[in-house]
Image (cartoon, helix red, strand yellow):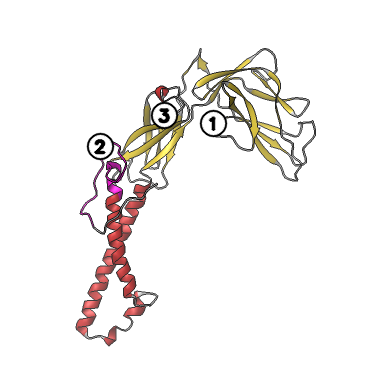
Amino acid sequence: MANLPETNTFPAGIYQIELTDPVVGGVDGISNVQARQLANRTRWLKNVADEVIAARGGGETLGDRLAGYDAFAPEQQTTIIAGVQEALGLAGVLARDLAALRQRIFAQGVVTIRNKHVISGLVLTKSEIRALHLSLSGTVGTGVSRARIDGIIVSLPDDDYHVSVPSNETDEAKVYYAYLINTGGSTYGVQIADEVPPTGLALYRIDVPAQNYGNSLSAVTLTDLRVIQPSNAWVSTFDPFATIAFPATLPAADYGVALEVESATNIAAVGALEAYDRATNGFKIRMTGSADNVRVRWTLLNIRYQ
């Protein structure tokens, strides 16, 4: 990833990105104009700050260097004091511009909207051995569980001993997670690991006590993590969303947001994207399509700085 080039100049103003401006990156891209202008100001002010540091003359502070003012003639003292005042004023400008630049750092980012949820079933229950049953209702019979994942709806029939629970021969409790995931081709199944991969749909948290390695799962705790969104026939009415949290609060929430899809399981099925619930500390993005793992680049527009 390349850095923006900087020049030792002090632009008179900072460009305001308009709602009509296209989102374009690169050195001369409109999305980088503000950052480049602030970077140039910062480089110019940094040079001034270096001169102030050099003026210390090896002292820890300017006060140490100025302690010998009495050795100078009155007119020399006046000149020196004027220079120090100017340097301090420029240092204040530098601090304000650095603060503005810090706010620009989070004016753009990337988030992934995951369209994964249980439609019905995918209930895991303990068996008489170190394995879990998979069923629609909690009792293995002739049921079929359904879930939306990877942009499609998958169906899993009830299955005895569908997945094994890891043993724990250590002296500390361990936490595992059961999740639905593509196991190859068009096949899906439940797996257990110490974390849920980005392409997996979390189902249960599994707490395994220390020294738990026998066939019995009586001491093992299952915590239901399923997000269940029932569908109307085969059509889901749930709009997946992602939350964007700013690292620092903006002065106002009347900003615009440009959204660009970078990738998805099926870009043609992303549908419409909408930024909503705008606040000074963040906003949300929702999607109306059926795609999954949708990577969205967002850019704030018309930000008002104080």
Amino acid type at circle 2 is: Asp
Judge by depth and name the residue closer to the eye, 300 or 57. Answer: 57
Q: CA distance from mark 3 to mark 1?
A: 19 Å
Amino acid type at circle 3 is: Arg
Q: Which residue is mark 2?
A: 21
In the rendered structure, are the residues bearing label 2 and label 3 in contact, judged by CB atoms less than 8 Å apart? no
Residue at 41% x, 38% y is 110
Residue 24, image quadrant: top left
Q: CA distance from mark 2 to mark 3?
A: 22 Å
Q: Answer few, some or many: residues within 10 Å of disc 3's Cα (few below 14, many 20 plus, some between 14 and 19).
A: some
Judge by depth and name the residue closer to the eye, 10 or 209. Answer: 10
Magenta-drawn segment: 10-35
Magenta region includes residue 17:
yes
Residue at 27% x, 46% y is 33
Q: Which residue is mark 1?
A: 199
Magenta region includes residue 273:
no
**Residue 213 drawn above or below residue 71:** above
Amino acid type at circle 1 is: Thr
Q: Specify whether 40 is left or right of 260.
A: left
Q: Nearer the viewer, mark 3 or mark 1?
A: 1
Q: Which residue is mark 3?
A: 286
